Amino acid sequence: MTEERLFDSSHAALVFAFNFSGQQYQASAMNKAMTPQIGSGKGLVGVDGAAQAGMIRRELGTLPELHRMVLTARLAPRDVPCECTRPCCSGRLPNGEWTDAIVWLTERAMQQLSGSFSHYRVRRSILEKIFGVKINLSEIAELCGVHRNSLSELNAKLKLWIEGEKGRKGLNSSPGVEAVAWLAIDGLLKAKGMVRCEEAA
């Protein structure tokens, strides 16, 4: 078995695993040759790609549920191709894996907002924004019927929970759950030889 690391980073490995599609099973030799290289450039498709994606997901599955859900919300596609061919279809449908992660985090967020008014739609909208949905706080306030100031307070609490406190010069930052999740998956994937370890300077 080769000792070559397939991915330059845990981020690249997880992006590959979340986006790996069974459609790649049908890739022809010419398609394989012309497909942009995946990860650090090994061109994983077909059975090899499925196996690698499965191994990455197995390591992800060993993390605490909170960490798994945060990484899924950050990297899983928000929608996936739909091939139903109905005239009303846009060709995309929500990715259940990403949606499930957001729903789980929305429920868990209640613990972070104890003592604050918060209903489900507000929490979910803020979390979707944190994880990449293009919506601003003013739009959320209007959609949910919440005062902008109250929404800003809830947004700050949830961002602190997920992303932590940004470090300022001379002060220590407080890591959020996402940073802890990244440290955990990084250690696992490097230990399994799937991600390149930085060489000591």
Image (cartoon, rainbow, N blue to C red):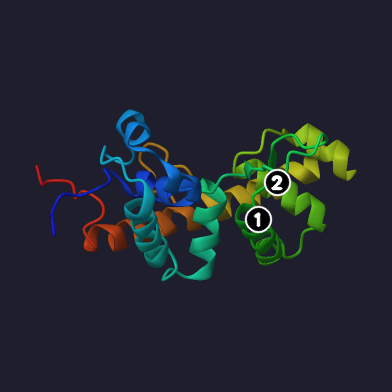
Q: Position of residue 181 (x, y in %)?
A: 43, 59
- The residue located at (66%, 65%) in the rendering is 108
Residue type pointed to by label 2: Ile
Is 81 in front, or is 199? 81
- So how many labels did they put on this image? 2
Q: Residues within 10 Å of mark 2 (few under 14, many from 20)?
A: many
Left or right: where 77 falls relative to 8: right
Instruction: Place residue 113 in its image quadrant.
Output: bottom right
Q: Position of residue 159 (x, y in %)?
A: 59, 48
* Mark whose residue sits in front, 1 or 2: 1
Which element type, helix, strand or loop, lies under badge 1?
helix
Question: What is the number of the mark on residue 86?
Answer: none
Q: Residues within 10 Å of mark 1 (few under 14, many from 20)?
A: some
Residue type pointed to by label 1: Gly
Q: Give the quadrant of the C terminus.
A: top left
Is 182 in front, or is 96? 96
Residue that numbered label 2 is attached to: 126
Residue that numbered label 1 is attached to: 96
Furthest toward the top, the residue is 34
Q: Position of residue 135 (x, y in %)?
A: 72, 34
Residue 86 vertical placement versus 69 (above, below): above
Q: Can see residue 118? A: no
